[in-house]
Amino acid sequence: MTARRTVLLAGTAAATAALLARPADRGGAYPPYFAEMNRLLRREGVDRPSLLIDLDRLDRNIDRVARSLAVAPAKTYRIVVKSVPSAELVDYIARRAGTRALMVFHVPFLQAISRLRPDADILLGKPLPVAAASTYYREASGRFDAARQLQWLIDSDARLAQYHALARTLGVRMRINLEIDVGLHRGGFAEPAAMGRALQAIADDPRHLEFAGFMGYDAHLMGLPAFLAERERPKVRARYGAFVAALRAGFPALAAGPLTFNAAGSPTFRHYEGDTLVNDLSAGTCLMKPLHYDLPVLEDFEASAFIATPVLKRLEGARLPALEWTGPLLRAWDPNQAQMLFAYGGNWLAQCAAPPGVQPHFAYVSSNQQGYSASAKVAIDVDDFLFLRPLQSEAVLLQFGDLLGLRDARIAARLPVLPAEAPR
């Protein structure tokens, strides 16, 4: 009797646990924001996966960055081009923000941007192979003056020697910005004493080299728990300050000119409000606010970039290839398996944003026709659109051709993307 009671209790407990573990129905209709987008795209005859930019949200995000950098002493706002990789979009942001300072990570981007904005002040965001610099000078054209407007990022004595040799060979003068390690430990000069030879080499040949400043990137703060980030921030500033102090003490002539002391990125630029040490802050991704940037410091920023992809097929019931008998069981267990949707393209670095409750199906991962499961509450049909929110901006925004800028329930702009033949 005791054994039977134990079995009954165990069975009851298992059944209760199973019921409690049963997924809730997460489906629903489009929120009004996405319902309006869906109507717009269908009305305009959009027929393929597209990357949408909400220009009104973008404007508000630009203004948030500009207000932060205007806190005295004001900083130069440097737009990170790889995060908004369209020359016309960069131009749009620059005009609204009132800046001509850009950060570029890729020679084809550098070539395109310097042609579109010949007045730009450009800082390389990573040290490039000397062959890339050689390519740039060999193919340079237009009014952009690299000797005055371009800063090459240098992370080591060896790379500086390569660039110095190239400058002498070409008979050009290169502006040199030194990458310093303020805690990220991804390269650059590790401590002030380590940059002495580089500064001396620049000082010794003013005909071919000009010192332009420092770049100290603090991206590691984004990945730290809050309590560690709070402790690390003053250390980042102290490390940066040590490099500036060493420059002024050891090379006062190099320190005399107007210099770029660049820092930050989208997750950290607000930490420098009122700071007197740096004068140049970079940000780009926060303007798009992809999912990876849902951070407390950017809580007031708005997601402004979305993927929209047409639904090609809508099928009732859950299904698995070669295991067709499991369909009714899956549907009975999980109400979110009531229907299957197959979309145009897929397998992007993105997550579903609308309608609610639509999720990628593990058996139909595809860059051709991604499969999604959805509950019966998801009221969607063939030729309607699924909306996804990118996880990041720089890679995703380059995959769809022209970006579609939306404003006032219409497609207000088509923004060609920059050349994407290689990593940014």
Image: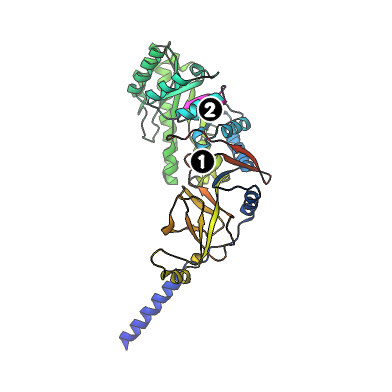
Is 199 situated left or right of 419 in this image? left
Residue closer to the observer: 379 or 129: 379
Name the amino acid type tagged 1: Leu
Answer whether residue 307 is magenta in the image: no
Residue closer to the observer: 139 or 2: 139
Question: What residue is rendered at 40% in x and 32% in y?
Answer: 182
Q: Would you call the spot at circle 1 few (<14 residues within 10 Å), some (14-19), or many (20 or more)?
A: many
First to last magenta residue range: 116-125
Q: Residue furthest bottom?
A: 1
Number of numbered markers: 2
**Secondary-structure class at tag 1:** helix
Q: Would you call the spot at circle 2 few (<14 residues within 10 Å), some (14-19), or many (20 or more)?
A: many
Is 44 situated left or right of 277 in this image? right
- Per the model, the C-alpha gap separating discs 1 and 2 is 17 Å
Q: Which mark is residue 397?
A: 1
Position in image of residue 14 (x %, y %): 39, 75
